[in-house]
Image: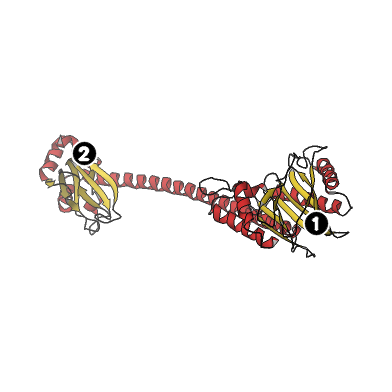
Amino acid sequence: MTLNLLAKIPLFADLPAHELDRILSVLNVKELIDREILFSEGDPGEHFYLVMAGELEVLMAAGQMEELQLNIMRAGEHFGEMSLILPGGHRTATVRARGDATLLSLSRVQFLDLTQKYPELSTSMVRVLSQRLDNTNTQTFHDLTEKNKQLQTAYDELKAAQAQLVEKERLERELQVAADIQLSILPDELPKVDGFNFGARILPARQVGGDLYDVFLLKDEKVGVVIGDVADKGVPSAIFMARAHALIMAEADMGLTAGEVMRVVNRHITRLQKSTQFVTVLYGILDLKTREFSYARAGHEPPLLLHPDGTVERIPHSSGMALGLWDAITLDERTVILPQGSTFLLFTDGLTDCRDTLGEPFGLQRIKETLADLSNVNAQQACDHLLETLMNFQDGSKQDDDVTLVAIHALK
């Protein structure tokens, strides 16, 4: 078996069988126990080894946290040829037994003696080294090619990531511009009139929302109040919101009733709109002399009235259709007299639908209970308190819809 192993080693392949017997006679037997180190990285290289039985580990940084296994040497394999011809060379790795192992070793001195007796060994050594050099060059070329591919892939991924980052920054800038435009449409401050005060708050679910509101002066001591909720969210909804707001403001100045304004605006929207977007709206006209609030409701949430005694009434309502879906629409048109000391609340469905961490919606009943305790505050304080109560209830859970509040408080 030993001769067969020697004959399979390229270094000895050209020698006849009887010469292999002589070489065998000068080889030394080395026995290792489990985990015994044959030599360590950096040790001088003086011997060539042939594995007769067992297994050996070839390691980098042996015994350290970053220990790396490079190879496993098994019976019939050999290593250390370079140590036979390079005096002063050092081991580049550690070899350790993995279980008991038996090796045959050949020192440099023994090898030089053998080359004098068998010159064929020198030729074999040159051939082996040349073959190893060719293999190394081939492997190096293969490794470099593979690394170049990996570098190209990494470069392409980096370029793609950079492009995505540039696109993300561009979208963020556009969103910020859209948000600024949207905020510029909403009133900077609400009108100040005798006998009433007004309040409003808006909390978009995204950077750009689809809710709208406004409070503006009309002729003949009247004030227009509008609140709306565009279907969906984001930039398209914000654009649709801006169009609806502009149309309502334009028609409100024509001296029409709330219902007439809504019908004209709906005709404009259905004529211009090419998508399935729509908006629910409540638009009303407050008469400062009579305290009458006449409004038309197009599919929007019915308003609430907080009476001076703390009771909260949901205004009776009938069905109403959102703007932008049909050419002819049905509206819920009503007139409410606001008693002195009362608060009239308009809101979008984001207020009722907002959920806590367990998924429970805020709901109409919580709105009424919260509003009931706000008899002695002005309209803006009522909006602020309602929104603060909602955010405490939400407790950081995801907000799915915009929340908008508008309040009218009739002074005593």
**Residue 281 image offset from top left, x and y in percent:** 75, 47
Q: How is the image coloured?
A: secondary structure
Is 385 situated left or right of 222 in this image?
A: left
Is 77 situated left or right of 196 in this image?
A: left
Q: Which residue corresponds to mark 2?
A: 76
Residue 21 to residue 221: above or below: above
- The type of residue carrying mark 1 is Arg
Front residue of 55/317: it is 317
For mark 2, does the 10 Å Cα neighbourhood hold few (<14), some (14 to 19), or many (20 or more) residues? some
Q: Quadrant of residue 134?
A: top left
Which residue is located at x 54 percent, y 45 percent? Answer: 360
Front residue of 72/255: it is 255
**Residue 221 image offset from top left, x and y in percent:** 86, 60
Which image quadrant: the N terminus?
A: top left
Q: Quadrant of residue 121?
A: top left
**Residue 278 image offset from top left, x and y in percent:** 74, 42
- The type of residue carrying mark 2 is Gly
